[in-house]
Amino acid sequence: MKILVINAGSSSVKFTLFEIDQETWLAKGQIERIRTPGASLKYSNHRGQKFEKSIIANSYEAAISEACLALCDQDHGVIGNLNEISGIGHRVAHGGAQVSGSMRITPAIKQIILNCYELAPLHNPPNFEGIEACEFLFHDIPMIAVFDTAFHQTMPPAAYTYAIPAAVAAEHKLRRYGFHGTSHHYVALAGAKALGKDVADVKLITAHLGNGCSITAVDKGRVADTSMGVTPLEGLVMGTRCGDLDPAVVLFLCRTGHSLDDVDQMLNKSSGLLGLAGIGSADMRDLIAAVDGGNANARLALDVFVHRLQKYIGAYAAVLNGFDALIFTGGIGENSSRIRALVCEKLGYLGISLEAAKNRTHDLVISSNAVGPKVLVIPTNEELMIARETARLLAS
Ligand code: AMP
């Protein structure tokens, strides 16, 4: 069964066509700079053919129809026509408190996505446009929305409730929602499999460390807690986001002449590793190079990043009352043996010790301890998870 996965962002659309029975991809690509004169399509297929070309894409329909042409092309295409596609899975950022799983797209589900614009103003609008473009282009092919917030809806009220007046929280839908849910769910399932167990029988801490970073405590397949909140700003230190902060910092900045928009921009775009290190980059590789070059601000940024992570792991060990594995994923989690080593250095009290050689080569299991939690490195695959969810819903 062929499943097309669409991830429509503010100026780009990523697509992957899967043969889901074998869990293999047939073709994938990305349309960038939609609605600009520099729009382009990157495409590759499982036979190793790839190309990049300029296109005209003044709308999401135009962009996705270029992807369709590539998929059906006689030379580099992988299908004869679009009717070979059994279903389309859309990545959707926010489903609010009403959505606790993947959903077949109906007018009611589209309304929920629209209702969550306020909670995800940068992501839900392009996700919605991607859905409408596909409705136009693919007619009767069933479509599924896979929400980044859905996995976290299994969280208990004690973990998702903010201690502000209940009526205010209810009026403005202010609560912990959590993000990267599809990634945390994927690596939790893969982690349980690597331990030779069912996810319903294990307790896991999943650390998604990319440009955005979040960490989740997964208790027998349900989320016990997660670090991102009503927006992705809360929690760990990230590339450009500050993560946890005394809310009074915001009040202080506003009272001392910064506009709300300034503060929003500052905390989301100019903070985190970028703001702390001041090396003009939010990239962990650049930060590590600056640390090795003796840059003291970069050193502090790295220390703050690692300290926050260690703190969360300790907190989640307590929330879970012990755990079976710590899983690293995301660009940093999958590729940086240095960060993994620094984080795990202080987890000896939990019984964790890393095997340096396995950590260096990014093995699946990088811990050496026979008892106590294992440490795993699992490349995330949100597209595959969306394709799986799409196939599951089509079959049900
Ligand atoms: P993502 O958002 O998951 O694509 O991850 C992006 C982040 O991964 C950036 O901060 C990169 O610097 C980081 N990253 C990728 N490869 C490495 C590496 N080998 N070492 C350290 N960080 C890396």
Image (tube, rainbow, N blue to C red):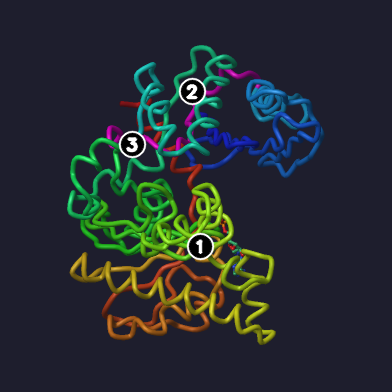
Q: CA distance from mark 3 to mark 2?
A: 28 Å
Identify which residue is drawn at 35% across, 33% down: 102
Residue on which disc 3 sits:
96
Where residue 56 appears, x then y in whole percent? 78, 25
For the residue marked with disc 2, what is the amino acid?
Answer: Ser
Label 2 Cα crowd, 10 Å radius (few <14 / some 14-19 / many 20+):
some
Q: CA distance from mark 1 to mark 2?
A: 38 Å
Counting residues from the start of the chain, the first of labels 3 and 2 encountered is 2
Relative to residue 244, is residue 319 drawn left or right?
left
Front-lying residue, 354 or 194: 354
Q: Is mark 1 within 8 Å of ligand 1?
A: no
Where residue 326 appears, x then y in whole percent? 36, 68
3 or 2: mark nearer the eye: 3
Badge 1 marks a residue whose secondary structure is: loop
Front-lying residue, 26 or 236: 236
Identify which residue is drawn at 70% across, 38% down: 32
Counting residues from the start of the chain, the first of labels 1 and 2 encountered is 2
- Considering the image in quadrants, where does the C terminus appear? top left
For the residue marked with disc 3, what is the amino acid?
Answer: Gly
For the residue marked with disc 1, what is the amino acid?
Answer: Met
- Contact (CB < 8 A) between labels 1 and 2? no
Q: CA distance from mark 1 to mark 3?
A: 23 Å
Q: Which mark is residue 238?
A: 1
Q: Which residues are magenta?
A: 80-99
Where residue 150 appears, x then y in whole percent? 33, 40
Counting residues from the start of the chain, the first of labels 1 and 3 encountered is 3
Where residue 366 appears, x then y in whole percent? 44, 75
Badge 2 marks a residue whose secondary structure is: strand
Residue on which disc 2 sits:
86
Badge 3 marks a residue whose secondary structure is: helix
